[in-house]
Amino acid sequence: MSTAKKLDIADVNVSGNEPGPKVRPFGLRDKLGYLFGDFGNDFFFILVAIFLMVFYTDVFHIHPATVGALFAVARLWDAFADVAWGRFIDTRKTTPNGKFRPWILRMSFPLVITGVLMFVKIPGMSDGFYLAWAFVTYIVWGTLYSTVNIPYGSMASVITDDPVERTSLSGWRTMGAQAAGLIIGVGGPMVVFVDNQIDHNRMLMAAIVFGVLALACYIACYKMVTERVVAPERPKVKGSSKATMKGLIKNKPLIWILVASLTFMVCTMLIQSVNIFLFKDYFANAKAVSMVNLVTSGTVFLLMPFLSPLVKRFGKKELAAAGMLLAGLVYLLLFFLKDISAMQFVGILTIGMLGNAIFNLVIWAFVTDVIDYHEYITNLREDATVYSIYSMARKVGQAVAGGLGGVLIGVVGYNSTLKVQTQETLDGIHALGTLLPAVIFLAIFLIIVFFYPLNKQRTIQLAADLADRRKENNN
């Protein structure tokens, strides 16, 4: 059975039967276009991750534990929506504009509109209304996010089949996310906080501005990226879903990168949720969150030029493990340094963020590797299905982090009606922002080292084996 073919400079059209137009070689245009995709995604994703919990607690006055329950329910729903949408896309025919790109353009408009509605506060309504508004708008936004993010993430494996080029795409995607994080994380607190309190009118204006920018980025992604690896249309075969499931279960690289990614997502979301409270209450300096976000994004941009050389020399698995070890040790150190200032905290954290940045830069390249491994063991090319399973794990991680973050903030005694929290609550917030990330990052280090099987040599061999098989199938 044919699996997939790579379109060269002059090749066939997507049906594989007739001469087609020349296909532009992979290059900077694709990298920039792919960057714009996650730039658009994260204008809202990071806005929500950083500000939505404090918006719900301090503007809608919803209890933190209830917010946590909302985040958990929504993300679990999204996890299953991801898989359903991934299977749906894999059953669609490839169009002249590609298989994945059209969905990014189609679904971006309702996604952005719903995102803005999350930050709308209608004056004079009851607490029950605000709670219902939060549940409905947040869950609908999360569902629509799947309809854009699944095709976007799946698209990386069809832009190119070269492992090094895919690593560069992973890096450029991360740069797009970090650029959005830099703008929102650094500028956002300066804009939306007034006298150390969130202002709902400013929050809404920020959401509108970022929504317009997100749409522009999605359109740029659609225009600039080219899909090159095309799977021939196959007749529907009875039992194909069963074969897919067997392949997923046998895909050990997928299973362990799912575990590592889920755990990493829990940590990242937890840090983003807790940091607002850590700096607003423990350090009494909410705007210092801007410096943390500047460091987080800055380390990614600092390391980006070295990504491909480092991967060529050491491998993705090896780099990711080293990054998690460094991040875990730095957060553990910060837990014991309780009397430092906010700026001293940020200064030490910068070292740990270098490790975090390494993992962030290579994580999406792991996904393209496990998609290839699925093809290798099943002879089926199912990019969207495999990516949706990966995305599902991240959504579960978001559900755990959202629920855990809200619950833990409540458990340590946070009270939004108090101007100054108790010392016991402040100590609890500090532990949530330091000790818990340390434990999680070190756990990820152990997972990558001892369980993820695709080291540098095996990844190179996998790409070579698939290339040979595709040549045989296409001859």
Image (spheres, helix red, strand yellow):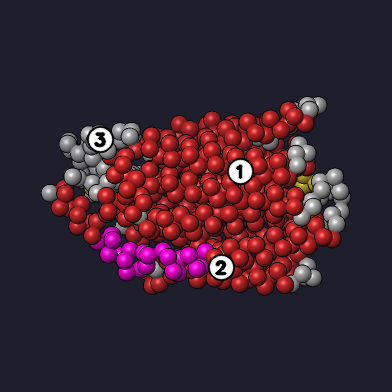
The circle on residue 238 is 3
Residue beneath the point at 63% across and 71% down? 330
Toward the viewer: 158 or 333?
A: 333
Indicate which disc, 2 or 3, sits on the residue closer to the N terminus. 3
> In the rendering, at what x and y percent does residue 253 appear?
38, 58
Kind of residue at badge 1: Ala
Q: Is residue 18 left or right of residue 323?
A: left
Label 1 sits on a secondary structure element that is helix
Q: Which residue is mark 1?
A: 72
Residue placed most toward the observer, 166 or 393: 393
> Is residue 160 in sight in this rendering?
no
Q: Nearer the viewer, mark 2 or mark 3?
A: 3
Residue 404: give x, y in percent of width and height: 65, 51
What amino acid does circle 3 point to? Lys
The numbered mark, 1 or 3, whose residue comes first in the sequence reads: 1
Tag 1 and tag 3, C-beta contact below 8 Å: no
**SS of the residue at dot 2?**
helix
Residue 34 lies in the magenta stretch: no
Q: Amino acid at mark 2?
A: Leu
Magenta extent: 444-464
Please name the residue that numbered disc 2 is placed on: 442
State the CA–CA distance, disc 2 to disc 3: 44 Å
The span from disc 1 to disc 3 (Cα, nearest Å) is 36 Å
Residue 354, which numbered label? none
